[in-house]
Amino acid sequence: MKKILTLMIMIIFLAAPNVFAKNVKYTLTWSPNTEPDMAGYKIYIRLNDNPYNYDDPQDPVCTIKDGKCWVDPTNENCDWETPDIPIPDGELTTICFVARAYDTGNNYSEDSNEVCDTVDLRILPASLITASIYNDATKTIDFVFTQEQSDRVIRWELYMGPASGGPYNKIKELVNSEGLTSPYSISWDVPGDGDYYFVIVGFTDEINSVDSNEVYVNVKVHPSPMHNFKIKARIQ
């Protein structure tokens, strides 16, 4: 029996990023086998340095069509979605997969190539806002903040609320791009006078941090300056 060709991870599905506990799913894809006595495929999953349990496979069966064994014969592909895989809270976890083909005589191929993915659910430290200043010239509030483990962050979101402790609404976003260095800065266009409360939240691919320290800014928009001038009236 021929060895399965290249196995690839196609898609990763994650739970909502505002919690730390997650189940993940993957879609695996591979080239179909061509043996006429093909019966199906077996997928094996391991976490971190644990060995594969070859007695507990996942079983995406296949159907022979035009000499090839397809998992989805209608669309002619071997794409298969894994079941939910629970990931431990607060940890860096590596998930790996191999596949085998088997025939009607229960003969198995060798393992396919191995594909792996890493899911980082380690707690992300909260951002720290070090300055929040209203700029009367630009009518903006300008924030400066720092972030531990900033290499994990893909973006920061700025939230504002009318009272201390929230609720907050997202008002601005800063993408962590190449060349962006600490301390970071972000500005928000002030709509008018008021009391404003702000927090910043960092996001990785998988999770988000808790709220940063809250900062309060009281804004009084100054009117345009008036210049003294004299009026002369002539009575005729």
Image (cartoon, rainbow, N blue to C red):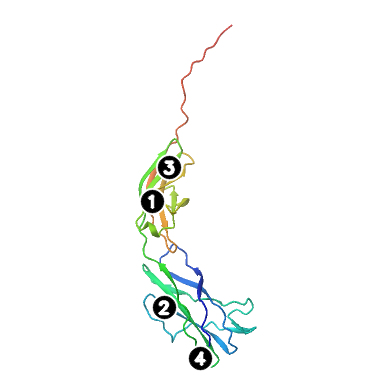
Circle nearer the N terminus (4, 3): 4
Q: Nearer the viewer, mark 4 or mark 3?
A: 4
User: Which element is circle 2 on?
Assistant: strand
The disc labelled 3 sits on which kind of residue? Answer: Ile
Circle nearer the N terminus (4, 1): 4
Where residue 100 sits: x, y (%)? 49, 83
Distance Cα–Cα, label 4 vs label 3: 69 Å
Occupied quadrant, residue 156: bottom left
Q: Which mark is residue 107?
A: 4
User: Which element is circle 1 on?
Assistant: loop
Where residue 7 sits: x, y (%)? 50, 76
State the residue position of label 3.
141
User: Which element is circle 3 on?
Assistant: strand
Where residue 183 sits: x, y (%)? 36, 49
The disc labelled 1 sits on which kind of residue? Answer: Thr
State the residue position of label 2.
46
Occupied quadrant, residue 154: bottom left
Q: Nearer the viewer, mark 2 or mark 1?
A: 1
